[in-house]
Image (cartoon, helix red, strand yellow):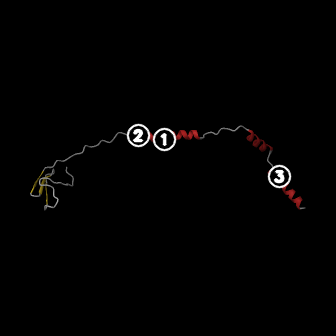
Amino acid sequence: MADESRHDVERRLREIFEPSPDAVGRVRDAALAEPQRRRGGWRPALAVAAILMGLAAVLVLWRGPEAPVSPASTEVLAGTLSEGLLVVQLPDGSTSITGGPAREGRSPEGSGVVLVEGDFR
């Protein structure tokens, strides 16, 4: 009896999963057909990559009109150095007096370094 129920189950499963003759024909035709070439592939991707690299090169090498560079302006200041004091007439009309006690390693008499901060207009 167990064999009969087993055969009955097998028969029912075959009936349920039995493919239609149309489906069998489609599968057979697809298996025997000539392989088709895929559309797309690596050629379009290669073309797109080449175009993007060309655009990147153009963007890197292309330079727009350069911004005008304003000429550096210089101010000429004249001053006198007398007895350790530096007196400078500034462009705004004021006078700067700088000095201090002599220090070791000082520049030779008649020369020196002047650091000026501010806006001279």
Label 2 close to label 3 by CB (< 8 Å): no
Nearer to us of marks 3 and 1 is 1
Nearer to us of marks 2 and 3 is 2
Near mark 1 (Cα within 10 A), the count class, few <14, some 14-19 or many ≥20, is few
Task: Answer left or right for 43 relative to 112.
Answer: right
Q: Amino acid at mark 1?
A: Met
Label 3 close to label 1 by CB (< 8 Å): no
Query: Which residue is labeled 1 in the image?
Result: 53
The label number, if any, that marks residue 91 in the structure image: none
Specify the farthest residue to the left.
83
The relative height of residue 96 versus residue 35 in the rendered view (above or below) is below
Q: Residue at x 42, y 42 (%)?
A: 60
Query: Which residue is labeled 3 in the image?
Result: 14
x, y (%) of residue 19?
Answer: 79, 47
Query: Which residue is labeled 2 in the image?
Result: 61
The quarter of the picture where residue 42 lies is top right
Near mark 3 (Cα within 10 A), the count class, few <14, some 14-19 or many ≥20, is few
x, y (%) of residue 10?
Answer: 84, 55
Q: CA distance from mark 3 to mark 1?
A: 59 Å
* Label 1: which secondary element: helix
Dot 1 or dot 2, earlier in sequence: 1
Near mark 2 (Cα within 10 A), the count class, few <14, some 14-19 or many ≥20, is few
Q: CA distance from mark 1 to mark 2?
A: 12 Å
* Label 3: which secondary element: helix
